[in-house]
Image (cartoon, rainbow, N blue to C red):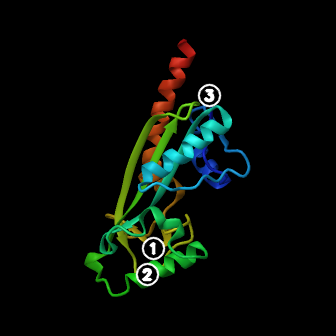
Amino acid sequence: MKVVLATNNRAKLEELARLAASEPWLDLILAPEGFNPSETGDTFVENAKIKAREAARATGLMAVADDSGIVVEALNGKPGIHSSRYCPGTDADRRAKLLLDLSAVPDDRRQAAFVCAMVVCDPDGSMAFNAIRYWEGRIARQEKGSNGFGYDPIFFPTNKDMTAAEMSAEEKNRLSHRGQAWRQVLKFLKEQNHLLERA
């Protein structure tokens, strides 16, 4: 079953393909070169739907998209859907801005959660399935760890004494918002594949 992932990010494709390694029926491919729809939605689900719909229409295949970010309680949910655009520059610049914005916030008020919305669209662009999952924790006071990306080095998952960037890839994928959402999407896709095989 060929499914297009609504991104040009090969690292994301490889991450999700590893998590689906036990599902040989799935052939996950990247969106066409230059794929870059405007994320104009007001929620993670809306932005994921925009990306999945455009990838489906561009390829005629079933498409999967995710939109994810971090929400911080003390900042009224920011950076939220703007996590990757919280400030100009690199991931390190965005982490530095978040730490600066929280510099006066005490440890007991630094709660946060990673959020991932994943949407599956049929080849005609209509939404067939969506899942939204959360990974709760708190924001650290300084960066720790070199694994992962984005805000991982400043995120302490609940009941963990290490940041997401200090965890092994296997443990992170088992616990993370994206891993949780992808397992739900895989279950849906597997059911669709069985239906196609029986048709």
Please determine whether, in this image, residue 140 is positioned above or below residue 24: below
Residue 154: image tag? 1
Q: Give the quadrant of the C terminus.
A: top right
Q: Secondary structure at mark 3?
A: loop
- Badge number at residue 1: 3
Among all residues in the image, which is located at the extreme bottom?
104
* Quadrant of res 163: bottom left
Q: Is residue 135 left or right of residue 36?
A: left
- What residue did someone put label 2 on? 99
User: Which mark is first along the chain, 2 or 1?
Assistant: 2
Circles 3 and 1: CB atoms closer than 8 Å = no
Of residues 129 and 107, the one nearer the viewer is: 129
183 above or below 91? above
Front residue of 177 and 165: 177
Q: Is residue 163 visible?
A: yes
- Is the residue 125 above or below the residue 87 in the image? above
Residue at position x 41%, y 55% in the image: 43
Q: Residue at x 52, y 60 (%)?
A: 168
Residue under the point 60% across and 46% down: 6
Circles 1 and 2: CB atoms closer than 8 Å: yes
How packed is label 2: few (under 14 Cα within 10 Å), some, or many (20 or more)? Answer: some
> Would residue 89 be found to the left or right of residue 174 on screen?
right
Which type of secondary structure does the marked residue at label 1 adopt? helix
Q: Is residue 174 visible?
A: no
Q: How many C-alpha atoms fall within 10 Å of the one at disc 1: few (<14), some, or many (≥20)?
A: many
